[in-house]
Image (spheres, grey):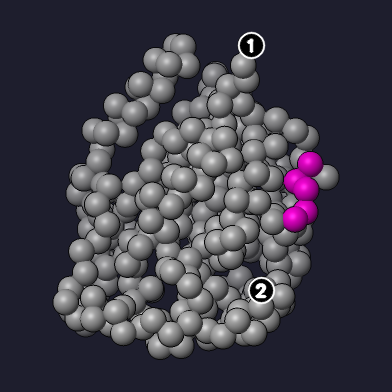
């Protein structure tokens, strides 16, 4: 299949799945994918309208300077217990299986921002023909990965890296990676530096291969829970522990990737309503799930 036909097929398949509703039995959630942002209630609109006071410039500079320390302290407090293992990754991103040219082809992946391995190790267990590079901002998180019983240098290489300034080429050959996963990582980085991450990743990704992205979307429940005094900028907030979170719009993410030379394959909101039946509690979650491709080299 030629590049143009492949792209048309991908776009058609993507269009067919937009605005569809599915039920997940994992966490009793309803899920809808599409290009429409979540509609806020009048109370939510009022809350966001009132919350316009920004954190002082002095504190913002301090948060940026201490970003690594704050994430290291996060992992010190929570060890490997905070995040659930992400077994949904291959279900949501079929490229992890479909990008092979033949059944047993060995894939090389990069998990940019691996944390303590909640995505990495389920992938390595499920697919024995994967070699993974994995990196994280936090030295403590990297150490937790290396201490995991499933860690093997024959199947993965893990290293500490600030993706905004440390060159990935110091650890990974140029144009050598089949798939890059960028899952709940970019939101923790200052919006002014996000393009540096994408530029860094671009250098190690093979032409024609994709970055698989999933992160917080505009008006996610977590965004609406921030108290007054937590706002750093538009859609950008700080948690009590000093870690930060950005909430993406479809348009912002698209422009961010395209400005660094990527082509958009899929870019859509995933809206989930998680239901706690015991407490009759419905929690609206919003994520942005996307695929961006490094173009094929010109002949």
Q: Is residue 206 at least partly visible in the picture?
A: yes
Q: Split into 4 quadrants, where in the image is the N terminus? A: top left
Q: Which residue is outermost to the right?
A: 170
SS state under label 1? loop
Q: CA distance from mark 1 to mark 2?
A: 42 Å
The residue under the point 42% across, 68% down is 235
Q: Is residue 107 visible?
A: no
210, above or below 295, in the image: below
Q: Which residues are magenta?
A: 165-169
- Tag 1: Cα neighbours inside 10 Å, few (<14), some, or many (≥20)? few
- List x then y, in percent, for residue 62: 68, 81
- Residue 66: % across, % down: 70, 77
> Can you give x and y, in whole percent of width and height, for residue 106 in the image?
64, 29
Q: Nearer the viewer, residue 84 or 214?
A: 214
* Quarter of the image that includes the C terminus: top right
**Mark carried by residue 299:** 1
Decide whether residue 41 is among the magenta residues.
Answer: no
Task: Characterize the magenta stretch by its predominant secondary structure.
Answer: loop
Using a 10 Å C-alpha cutoff, classify the residue at mark 2 as few (fewer than 14 neighbours), some (14 to 19) or many (20 or more): some
Question: Is 233 on the left or on the right of 133, as rendered?
Answer: left
Q: Does residue 171 sit above or below 41 in this rendering?
A: above
Element type at marker 2? helix
Who comes first in sequence, dot 1 or dot 2?
Answer: 2
Q: Residue at x 51, y 76 (%)?
A: 232
Disc 2: which residue: 64
Using the rendered view, name the quadrant where residue 271 is placed. Answer: bottom left
- Residue 167: within the magenta? yes
């Amino acid at each position: 299949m030629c590049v143009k036909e492949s792209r048309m097929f991908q776009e058609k398949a993507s269009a067919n799945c937009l605005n569809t509703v599915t039920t997940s039995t994992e966490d009793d959630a309803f899920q809808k994918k599409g290009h429409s942002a979540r509609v806020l209630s009048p109370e939510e609109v009022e809350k966001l309208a009132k919350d316009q006071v920004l954190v002082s410039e002095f504190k913002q500079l301090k948060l940026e300077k201490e970003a690594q320390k704050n994430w290291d302290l996060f992992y010190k407090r929570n060890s490997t217990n905070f995040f659930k293992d992400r077994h949904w990754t291959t279900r949501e991103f079929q490229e992890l299986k479909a990008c092979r040219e033949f059944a047993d082809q060995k894939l090389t992946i990069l998990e940019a921002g691996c944390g303590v391995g909640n995505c990495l190790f389920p992938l390595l267990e499920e697919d024995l023909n994967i070699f993974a590079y994995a990196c994280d901002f936090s030295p403590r998180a990297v150490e937790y990965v290396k201490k995991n019983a499933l860690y093997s240098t024959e199947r993965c290489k893990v290293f500490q890296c600030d993706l905004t300034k440390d060159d990935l080429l110091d650890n990974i050959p140029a144009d050598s990676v089949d798939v890059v996963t960028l899952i709940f990582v970019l939101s923790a980085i200052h919006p002014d530096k996000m393009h540096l991450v994408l530029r860094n990743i671009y250098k190690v990704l093979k032409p024609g291969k994709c970055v698989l992205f999933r992160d917080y979307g505009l008006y996610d429940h977590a965004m609406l829970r921030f108290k007054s005094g937590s706002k750093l900028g538009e859609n950008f907030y700080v948690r009590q522990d000093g870690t930060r979170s950005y909430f993406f719009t479809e348009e912002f993410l698209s422009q961010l990737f395209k400005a660094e030379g990527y082509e958009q394959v899929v870019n859509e909101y995933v809206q989930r309503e998680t239901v706690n039946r015991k407490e009759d509690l419905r929690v609206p979650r919003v994520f942005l799930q996307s695929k961006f491709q490094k173009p094929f080299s010109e002949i």
